[in-house]
Amino acid sequence: VVTATTGKPKFTRAKSKASGRLLVGDFLYKKDMVETGPGEMAALALLSGVELRVNAQTRFEVSEGGGGEMPASIQLGIGQVWTKLLHGKAGFEVRTGAAVAAVRGTEADAEFHDRLRVRVYEGVVDVTNGFGSQTLTAGTMLEVANARSAPQSPQSMTPADQLAWQEGVAPKDVEPLLQRLRSEAQASRDVEFSVPGKDGTDRKVRFKLKKK
């Protein structure tokens, strides 16, 4: 569920290809796309208890919402995201063309443009691809040049390495929106919403939510 926005970030539904402005309270589903332009940001809360903040000029696909057996995850095409696990049982993966960052701790930042950069502020993150794996702890960072290069050894962050862009899109009340998301999932295995059809009428679309 969307918890905050700045500017006019966009979404595209996977099934219908319908698109529009991302608004606070909107639900996102598996394979939906989110895109922010210059000066635009967004914040999301996932069913598994993950808070995700999205920097400007970022594009990603929702891979898993975290409501089933698989951990919540996104496929980051380009840009930067910050993640915070709201409770100890949550898990989150940022998948990119260079490597996968599996967040097992509390707070981390992943940036993917020409290469993947991962910063860990609290907790632990495992960064893995077909050529190797590294584990980052709080106060460390690393880079992965591409999918054919092993992740570099973690390095200590300097004060200049520690970013604060995520504070520009901090949501005020995450827990009520998370409770709404959980209630929707518990009330029914189906979540329904309306999308505009080509003839101008609304069409009902149902998505299955897998309970734990």
Image (cartoon, grey):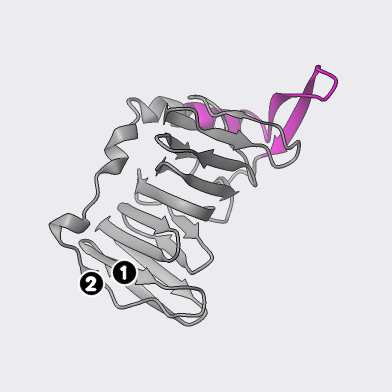
Residue farthest left in this picture: 159
- Observer-nearest residue: 211 or 200? 200
Residue farthest bottom in this picture: 131
**Residue 123 shows in this picture:** no
- Observer-nearest residue: 190 or 101? 101
Quarter of the image where one finds residue 52: top left
Q: Residues within 10 Å of mark 1 (few under 14, many from 20)?
A: many
Q: Which residue is mark 1?
A: 142
User: Alpha-carbon distance for marks 2 and 1?
Assistant: 6 Å
Residue at the image position 75 percent from the left and 40 percent from the top: 15
**Residue 48 shows in this picture:** yes
- Observer-nearest residue: 110 or 79? 79
**Residue 90 picture location, percent across and down:** 42, 50
Q: Is residue 87 left or right of residue 95?
A: left
Residue at the image position 67 percent from the left and 37 percent from the top: 13
Quarter of the image where one finds residue 28: top right
**Residue 41 picture location, percent across and down:** 41, 36
Identify the amino acid type marked 2: Gln
**Is residue 65 part of the magenta span, yes or no?**
no
Magenta stretch in the rendered image: 180-208
Residue at the image position 51 percent from the left and 25 percent from the top: 23
